[in-house]
Image (cartoon, rainbow, N blue to C red):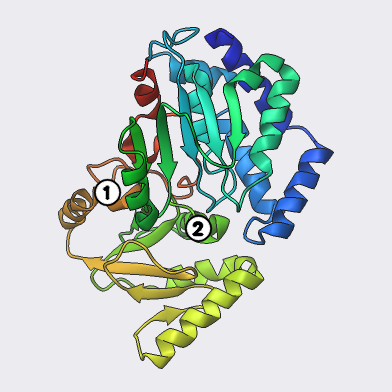
Amino acid sequence: MTLIERLEVLGKLGTHLKEEDDYLEAVMQRTAYENPWFTVENQKRAVAAIAEEMLNLEKLKAWTMPYFIPDAPPERKVVGLVLAGNIPLVGFHDVLCVFVSGHVAQVKLSDKDLYLLPYLLKLLQKYDSRTTDYFQIVEKLQDFDATIATGSNNSARYFEAYFRNVPHIIRKNRNGVAVLTGAETRAELQQLGEDIFQYFGLGCRNVAKLYVPQGYDFQALLEVLEAFRAVANHTKYRNNFDYNYSLYILNKEPHLSNGVIILLENPAFQSRIATLHYEFYNDLQEVEQAIRQHQEEIQCITSKVNLLNIKTLKFGQAQQPGLADYADEVDTMQFLLSLS
């Protein structure tokens, strides 16, 4: 397949995903049954975001324009992909990149997300049978030339050792942060709530920590976040909330809560499920310095537009990455093109 043919078939998939598909609905129902964190609503949200941001033909063309991507790489490689399973289709961008580059994606699915991606690949084959040659779904990676593996900090140590002899990208735990000034509108706080609660806060782009000014009044924030009570009614989320809430009370750990989320003053970037950390600051330069010092722990930053002298997203956009929003700021496409 030529590059434009690969882009066009992806565009057809994007169009399909915006239409009704009873079989896709059934796949989502099965996934939700086996993994209650992956509600049908959240799966639909992930699919809709992918269709809009990653499978739009014009966006695909614009994204690939700066690269020199041949119709076929000089030497076609097998790229092993170890996909995470924290949110639905979280590894789709890696799969897409390998396909666009012209290499072969050998995919190890997460046992938490076994059905969605294979179905999307079948849809690609429906629109062009030649795509079959670009994907392999496997139980164990083998005979690969390079790899991209995503997991926890613990699994990353294993990945580093296991894949040390081939070109690789290893991704560890990262989290989203938000920087508040106290002047945010209720609408902006509502959008921040989306960054916090989408996918139950399980994504590496979800906001898990707030930077707030000294003396910040949390009342308005807690009131707005209470509107996300539907999230807290989910059984697994509620179990985590109740456990953590009881733990903080028993340990007499100071905290704030509105029955939906628990706020703790804690410098760590990773927080427990149903918990949000915050840290006070004196001035924004202090925040910028802290963020630069901890870049390897941060996936994205949300704040008011132009608040900081570093790259930030508007509130509400944390879980809407585009094609050029590479995880960990590592250019996946450039990595793949360097393999040939």
Q: Nearer the viewer, residue 45 or 313?
A: 45
Under circle 2, the secondary element is loop
Say what secondary structure mark 1 lies in. helix
Residue bearing mark 2: 202
Q: Residue at x 37, y 90 (%)?
A: 251
Residue 327 position (above or below residue 338): below
In the rendered structure, the answer to whether residue 36 lies left or right of residue 323 reads right
Asked if residue 28 lies left or right of residue 69, the reply is: right
284 is higher (above) or lower (below) than 138: below
Q: Are marks 2 and 1 in contact (CB under 8 Å)?
A: no
**Of marks 2 and 1, which one's residue comes earlier in the chain?**
2
Can residue 325 be seen by looking at this rendering?
no
Rendered location of residue 165, percent (x, y): 31, 33
Quadrant housing residue 64: top left
> Can you tell which mark lies on residue 296?
1
Image point 60% across, 29% down: which residue?
136
Residue 131 image position (x, y, % from top left): 64, 19
